[in-house]
Amino acid sequence: MTDRFDLAGMENVKVSVGDVSGDLRVRGWRRRQAAVDMGGATEAPVLSNGELSIPACAGDCKLRVPEDSQIVAGTVGGDFELAGVAGSCSVGIVNGDATIRKCGAVTVESVSGDLRVRRMSGALSVGKIAGDATLRQIAGPLDVEEIAGDAYIRRLGAAGRVGSVAGDLILDTDFQAGMTYEFGVGGDLVCRVPPNASVRFSLPVNVELSLDAEPASREERDDRLLITFGRGDATVKLDVNGEVRLLQWGGAGRRRRYSRWTRPGGWTDEHGGWQVSWRASEPSEPADEPVTEDERLVILRMLENKQITVEEAEKLLSALEE
């Protein structure tokens, strides 16, 4: 049975949801109405003083609310889905997977499964993610405490911090001037450096590094390795236990590919401590249509696992975009 509520004349309605034993799905729409479909609830929803209160339920809960609603939810026993809600949203523990798209600011205490996020106009704050995380097109600041699996992060519009990624991290974003980004990675990291980027990377001095890009400068300072592109207007602090690969393609001009190097105890060449070789190759032409996210991720995964070279990755992306 679906309960319906008329919200005409009411803006930014607060929707409070108790603990849900099953799945919780919340979707925004343009109507000034709310529709509540609950399974296993012993009490009915109540609309009072501009707030819609939804009691705990033993089954699944499906909500349709105005786009500007503010959501506050407790523990979710199953999966959580939030779509099309521009107001703020706060959720407790999600014991399944979580999917968030086309939303405003969102806070989640923890996710026991995977987290998938796309097209957020506000900030995203998450405690622990027990599975993998795919985070794309987040306009506000990103703050994640821990990701127990792998992570793919693309197109951040503001500062970003991930305290710990236990697996691998693929990072593909334009680094905004004046912003600081921090990532701790237990596995490997692959990062695409945009053409004409102005960013400074700070890494542990003994990191295993592959440079498939041409930085403006490289220096060692206070046990950190600083790799600077352009003026270095953005700062990216990386603490990585595995290998770091910085890649660059898609811009005008020729790209030089630097060989991988390690620093076990000191630099070994005669030119200031940097042993570098390169070979030039022509970059692929930019495409009119973007590659789909899943296809792009597959190619970057293959590149990360060294199944293909940077040149082969360029060709695959170009072929998909034609």
Image: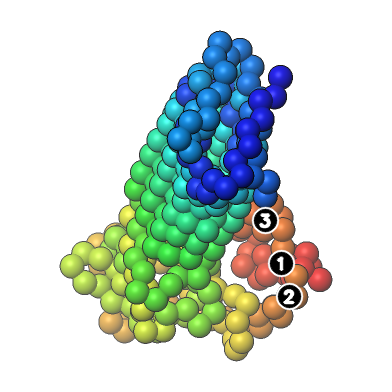
Residue at image position (39%, 76%) is 177
Circle 3 SS class: helix
Q: Residue 142 location in percent, x, y?
A: 42, 54
Circle 1 SS class: loop
> Which label sits on residue 290?
1
Q: Are marks 2 and 3 in contact (CB under 8 Å)?
A: no
| Left or right placement of residue 18 versus residue 119 in this view | left
Query: CA gap, disc 2 to disc 1?
Result: 7 Å
Circle 2 SS class: loop
| Left or right placement of residue 219 versus residue 132 in this view | left
Q: What residue occupies the far right of the structure in this picture?
A: 322
Query: CA gap, disc 2 to disc 3?
Result: 15 Å
Residue position marked by numbered label 2 in the rendering: 287
Q: Residue 58 location in percent, x, y?
A: 56, 14
Q: What residue occupies the far left of the structure in this picture?
A: 222
Residue at image position (35%, 58%) is 182
Q: Image quadrant for the C terminus?
A: bottom right
> Which label sits on residue 293?
3
Amino acid at circle 2: Ala
Determine whether 237 is above or below 107 in the image: below
The image quadrant that residue 255 belongs to is bottom right
Q: Are marks 2 and 1 in contact (CB under 8 Å)?
A: yes
In front: 288, or 94?
Answer: 94
